[in-house]
Image: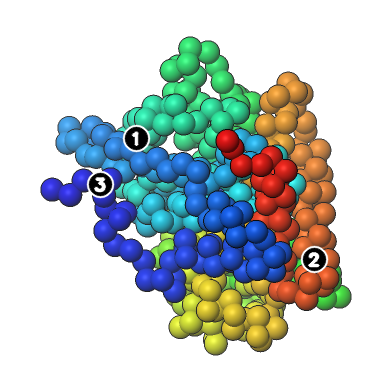
Amino acid sequence: MTSPLLLPLEAPTPAHICPLNQACSYLEQAAQELNLDSGVLTILSYPRKVVTVSIPVKLDSGEVQVLAGHRVQHCDILGPYKGGTRYHPAVTLQEVSALAMLMTWKCALLGIPYGGAKGGIALNPSHYSVGELERITRRYTSELIKDIGPSVDIPAPDMGTSSREMAWIMDTYSMNVGHAVPGIVTGKPISIGGSRGREMATGRGVMIIVREALAQQGKSLAGARVVIQGFGNVGSAAALLLQEAGAKILAVSTGSGGVYAKEGLDIPALKTYATANHKQLAGFPGSAAITNAELLTLSCDVLIPAALENQITEENVHKIQASIIAEAANGPVSLNADKELEARGVTVLPDILANAGGVVVSYLEWVQGISYVFWDEERVNQEMEGLMVQAYHQVVQQSQARQVPLRLAAYTLGVGRVAQALTDRGLYP
Ligand code: GLU
């Protein structure tokens, strides 16, 4: 029998859609643009620590299953490692490594004092009971106990996890060390020191960045035609906030397909419908069914991929009609598709900027926790908006100054700050 620890190594993703290959390629482009020292580039190309653990779990049926759990710590030059924990069947070590690297640039770009990390377990959460998920999460945390910590590595929610899993991680860590450590995770429930506004934060950040990009083109959210792939935590929050700001949400989807309405969907009603129908959107009154492939190619002003990597690729990029693409997901546009979109003059708002609202509010949660002073939601949203708008304008300025697309501009800022810190700190020993 094959060990689950080895599974991620068995099926390498083809190079042109490999998320790690893509992340390294963007890093190399930034290094070239910045004229980075080759030693610095080499150091930044590798994660500092890669941990893969077995997670044996007794299922409710009595059967024992062993899952593989990863935590990749890319870089802690600017501060503790920071990044989410993903539960999804497509999780691989390669993917987690790429996402850890993106976290490093994202935190540096937003000017928050963290490094980058990511964790993940390859599982479909809907195939497990709540009790099983709790045992999996607690065992995963125990296995990583020496590698995480409030000033070492701070996990957060990601795809397939939420405040519930963060509470289990916090409790397991605290029981192991013998005292309560709320700072071990962010995105935790408010009852144990979570921040107001954290749940909607990534979606809110997406709305802010789209609003700024439209404003730059002399347009506004009012009446903007928006299409969103993904109706999970990020996609649904972005949809709600964009609609509140006057945008028309023409279509949204989940993994099993989507719904379309020419005059715009009623998002609060759709959320209620999805909750009552086991996340199925099909059959929502006043809408037509649409596949994920059709959704991406709809005529619209703003397309927001808020699901998995590699959704816009060489195969479908020529059919994309949006003039702005906001990457709410990490890496939703493949390398070659990105080149084509650039050539066509499509504005791509890169992931490390567009979806940074989550980690920004994680940082604000950390700040509140350290100071024992908790803010109301208005204050949290205001602080987050300030950091997001500032980063957006820095990226635009950098893009104009260097005559490069927004993604490369964002990368040069993020990578440049980490490289500067690395140079200032020097190489140990
Ligand atoms: N998982 C989110 C991200 O990819 C949030 C990470 C965090 O808050 O640490 O940005």
Mark 1 within 8 Å of ligand 1, using the beta carbon: no
Q: Residue furthest top?
A: 178
Image quarter of residue 398? bottom right
Residue 136, numbered label? 1
Find disc 2 in the rendering and name its residue.
398
**In the shown orientation, is residue 382 left or right of residue 350?**
right
Pointer 2 or 1: first along the chain: 1
Q: Is residue 54 above or below residue 321?
A: above
**Alpha-carbon distance for marks 3 and 2?**
44 Å
| Element on which disc 2 rests | helix
Residue 274, numbered label? none
Say which of 274 and 100 sits in front. 100
| Res 401 seen here | yes
Q: Residue at x 64, y 26 (%)?
A: 193
For the residues bearing labels 3 and 2, Cβ distance under 8 angstroms: no
Image depth: mark 2 or mark 1 in front: 2
Q: Residue at x 44, y 56 (%)?
A: 95
**In the shown orientation, is residue 309 left or right of residue 264?**
left
Residue 121 on image: x %, y % = 38, 45
